[in-house]
Image (cartoon, rainbow, N blue to C red):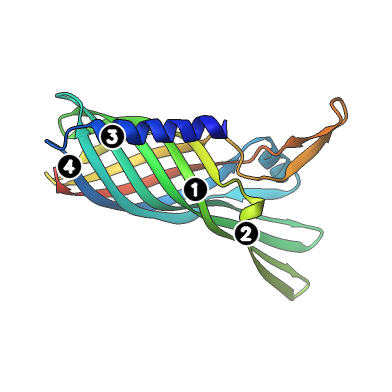
Amino acid sequence: MKKIAIFVIIVTVVFIGTLPAQGMGFGVKGGLNMAKFTGADVKEMTDGGLDEKYLTAFSVGGFVTFPLGSSLTLRPEVLFTQNGARYEGSEEGVEAKISMKMSWLDIPVLAVFNLGNIGIFAGPYFDLFLSGKTKLEASYQGQSFDEEEDIKSEEIKSLLYGIIFGAAYGITDNIDIEVRYSQGLNSFDKEPDNYDSTYGAYEESDVKPSMIQLFVNFYLKK
């Protein structure tokens, strides 16, 4: 799947390079992310007494638009994006908070269908891992414990991919408000998880990123 994702990126870059510059627009954007994890291994964690909470993070970057017709636009983006998850819980008097935040070079390629001031869009995204950090806070009978640890690149897959869909509303000629949902399609964890006795091998962990995102888009040229 990684080879397929890389092939799709190359084809997309080549295709964008063939598009005419006439009518091209560009701008900058920034927004808020409400992030969490999905997958079978997340359910096992929450079944163990931890409650999943949304992790607040952000995205910032730029985009380019290419008209493909009277109502259709191609919009590649390059963003610095943070995602992750947060968990809280207590058991036998121990209060615990766990958070995991990761930073990525995020490359969505979106097809936008324009209906007046409203734009409806969908498309794939590709993420390249930059850095990350886990944080543990625990307390028991008045004693507290805090620990932070960097996430190493060898622990995380270097390339993630997924899908995005959402909608935008133009509040002025050059400013859009946008809401989108992104869902990862491959697990970010390199380490195998459960041992499958049937096949005599470890199964790949099933933990995928997902986010609800709110953006403000500023068109410098439309």
Q: In which quarter of the image is residue 125?
A: top left
Q: Earlier in the sequence, mark 1 or mark 2?
A: 1
How much space separates mark 4 and mark 2, taking CA atoms?
37 Å
Measuring 84% from the left and 26% from the top, which residue is drawn there?
A: 199
How much space separates mark 2 and mark 3, taking CA atoms?
34 Å
Task: Give how far across and how far down residue 33 sits, in percent.
Answer: 43, 50
Q: What secondary structure is found at the residue carrying circle 1?
A: strand
In this picture, residue 176 sits left or right of residue 31: left
- The residue under label 3 is 16
Q: Which of marks 4 and 1 is nearer the N terminus?
A: 4
- The residue under label 4 is 25
In this picture, residue 149 sits left or right of residue 115: right
| Foreground of the two, 66 or 172 | 66
Mark yes or no: residue 187 visible: yes
Residue type highlighted by circle 4: Gly
Mark yes or no: residue 110 visible: no
Task: Give how far across and how far down residue 65 sits, in percent.
Answer: 22, 38
The local crowd at label 4, few if under 14, some if 14 to 19, many if 20 or more residues have their Cα within 10 Å, is some
| Labelled disc at residue 128 | 1
How much space separates mark 4 and mark 1, taking CA atoms?
25 Å
